Amino acid sequence: MLSPEEQLPPPPVTALRQRIEHRRSSRTKKGPMPRDLWEEAARLARQRGIYAISSALRLNYDALKGWSEDSPKKRRRAAPRKATTGQTFVRLDPLPGISSPSPAVEVEMPGGAKMTIRLSSVNAMDAVALLGAFMRDRR
């Protein structure tokens, strides 16, 4: 049988559990746990085992496993992409020695919809009207 001292979690686990519990009790709305807490829990899980740490900290086992393993899934979760809120204009100058049979404008919306306008067959006003219709339909 284990002595009472052996049954207590190690000090780093206890300190992290207190920080997580404080966050849980003091937050005003639901949201993901901060990255620094996940990273510290993952470090402890790599040292002491995922199940032991997820149980001690009351964390989802699969989520902690994802943070503990060095995998693309973990990296995506660690650095989430932010949605683009505004439009972006990028000007690319032609590369020397490469010529195109006709200039083209390519537009890609954040949702993945794409449109290409070949300027040799369309006047500028038509291109503006096509672009406006394309963007209105995708909002």
Image: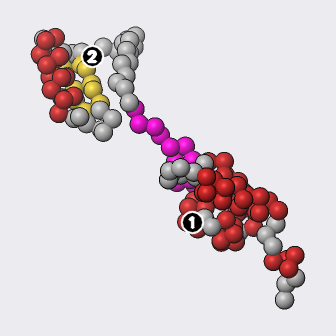
The residue tagged 1 is: 60
Q: Residues within 10 Å of mark 1 (few under 14, many from 20)?
A: few
Q: Residue at x 60, y 57 (%)?
A: 24
Residue 35 is left or right of residue 95, and the answer is right
Name the residue tied to disc 2: 100
Three-letter code for the amino acid on which mark 2 is drawn: Ser
Q: Nearer the viewer, residue 22 or 1?
A: 22
Name the residue located 50 percent from the left edge and 50 percent from the top edge.
29
Residue 66 in magenta?
Answer: no
Residue depicted at x 87% and y 82%:
3
Asked where in the image residue 129 lies, by quadrant, the reply is: top left
Element assignment for label 2: loop
Residue 88, horizontal then vertical, whole percent: 37, 22
Q: Is residue 50 visible?
A: no
Q: Where is residue 38? Give x, y as percent.
A: 64, 54
- What amino acid does circle 1 point to? Asn
Range of magenta residues = 71-84
Residue 28: x and y in percent read 53, 49
**Rendered location of residue 32, percent (x, y):** 53, 52
The circle drawn on residue 44 is none
User: Hey, which residue is sitting farthest bottom in the picture?
Assistant: 1
**Residue 73 colored magenta?**
yes
Image depth: mark 1 or mark 2 in front: 1
Question: Is 39 or 89 nearer to us in this picture?
Answer: 39
Relative to 83, say whether 75 is above or below: below
Relative to 26, say whether 4 is above or below: below
- Which structural element holds mark 1? loop
- Left or right of residue 33, residue 95 in this image: left
